[in-house]
Amino acid sequence: MTRPIVAGECIILLDTADDKEFFLTLREKGQINLHKGKILHSEIIGKCEGSLITSSKSHPFLVFRPTLYQLIMHMKRDTQIIYPKDLALILLYADIHPGCTVLEAGTGSGALTLALLRGVGPCGKVISYEIREEFVKRAKRNISLYYGNSPNLEIKLRDIYEGIDEKKMDRVILDIPEPWRLVNDVAGCLRLGGVFVSYLPTIIQVKSLVETLRADRRFVSIRVLESFIRDWNVDGLSVRPFHRMVAHTGFLTLATQGEAP
Ligand code: SAH
């Protein structure tokens, strides 16, 4: 479906010479000043995705709506975020599906929340706990940039270590420093057959979590994994991996809840 771009939308301007991306929100009277010339927002408003725009210095740019990946990489963040390579794994390994109910903490800048909202769809629900008000505001701004209103999202300004209200959730996903403190609460919050995922930056944290999950005896299929993505340079005879890559983000710990034997 091609729908003209309107004021208020965020867009990606792509420099066709080097694939450099510029992320901006369009205003009726706005303008963007780049090394390669100036572009009035009014020249973009009304165009469809993929249209060519020419700057005041006659340089060509293409205009696109951001993909979720692009939004997450360009949006403002006040916290570490979960990167797309890990978000992609969480969506499939935690089996996030339309209609699913997910309990999340902490909301942070909203990167995981954005991915979860897409996965659960309008019939699902995401409930997200965040202890710091400024991060709640940041996440809400990022989420509304992409989805506008999200009636299927509830953000609670709460310390999750003080307890979880929700019961019979399909999935619980934690990106907080000490998830082992919540293993009993997670078991009370998940339905039987529900999936728990934790994202942790260090393996020492993972060890504490896995040992607590095992001791609880209600969690099975406990699995720890990490992911690497290596981009490749394909240019003439230079067909090889890029020299640089993201070497470490975090570890995923997955577990499914069943009745204790
Ligand atoms: N997953 C997020 C990033 C989360 S960063 C994203 O992808 O954008 C970790 C967040 O957990 C921080 O915002 C921090 O304030 C929050 N947090 C830490 N301890 C918490 C607690 N006890 N209860 C709720 N939120 C907590």
Image (tube, rainbow, N blue to C red):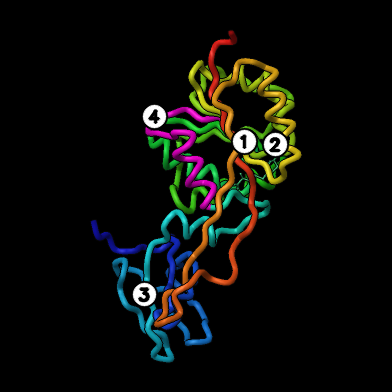
Q: Which residue is mark 2?
A: 206
Image height check: is 15 above or below 133?
below
Q: CA distance from mark 2 to mark 3?
A: 44 Å
Circles 1, 4 touching at the beta carbon (< 8 Å): no
Residue 192 appears left or right of 177: left
Amino acid under label 3?
Answer: Leu
Picture mark count: 4
Whether disc 1's CB lies below 8 Å from ligand 1 is answered: no
Q: Is residue 13 above or below residue 164?
A: below
Q: CA distance from mark 3 to mark 4?
A: 36 Å
For the residues marked 4 and 2, what is the alpha-carbon distance in whole angstroms?
30 Å
User: From what the image shows, is residue 207 above or below residue 2?
Assistant: above
Residue 38: % across, % down:
47, 84
Disc number for residue 198: 1
- Which residues are drawn in magenta? 84-103
Between discs 3 and 1, the one toward the N terminus:
3
